[in-house]
Image (tube, grey):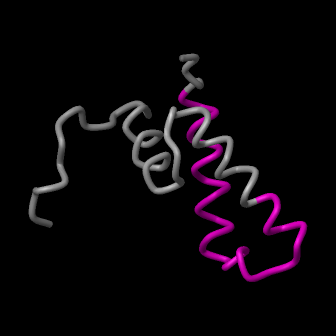
Amino acid sequence: MLMAHPAVLKNLIEQYETLRVLHAEEGHEEVRRRMDDIAYTLCVSTGTSDIDAALIAAQHRLPGARVEDDSLLAT
């Protein structure tokens, strides 16, 4: 599997998170399509099949990401 460059992943994550914060999925068709395109690209870039898994996988590929599974750590 080809691996996306961390800078590309970071940019895709930022775009997706921005659109999600702005509730783009409820907006104009063109904006929803852009959000869907970014989600699809993240999935393909990380070898996952849903956006939540793609976001986690992409974040773990960024510089400084923790290698260990931190899902059970208390906040």
Q: Residue at x 58, y 62 (%)?
A: 17
User: Does 16 appear above or below 13?
Assistant: below
Q: Residue at x 19, y 54 (%)?
A: 71
User: Does 3 appear above or below 34?
Assistant: above
Left or right? Give the position of 62 relative to 49. Answer: left
The range drawn in magenta is 6-34
User: Does 11 appear above or below 3?
Assistant: below
* Residue 43 spot, x, y in % from top left: 58, 42
Q: What residue occupies the far top of the structure in this picture?
A: 2
Q: What residue occupies the far front of the structure in this picture?
A: 49
The one nearer the camera, 29 or 16, is: 29
Q: What residue occupies the far bottom of the structure in this picture?
A: 26
**Majority secondary structure in the magenta region:** helix
* Residue 36 spot, x, y in % from top left: 72, 58
Left or right? Give the position of 15 relative to 5. Answer: right
Q: Quadrant of the C terminus?
A: bottom left
Q: Residue at x 57, y 50 (%)?
A: 13
* Residue 70 spot, x, y in % from top left: 17, 49
Left or right? Give the position of 32 relative to 59. Answer: right
Q: Quadrant of the N terminus?
A: top right
Quadrant of the image occupied by residue 34: bottom right
Residue 32 counted in the magenta span:
yes
User: Does 26 appear above or below 63?
Assistant: below
The one nearer the camera, 20 or 46, is: 46
Q: Residue at x 53, y 29 (%)?
A: 6
Residue 29 counted in the magenta span:
yes
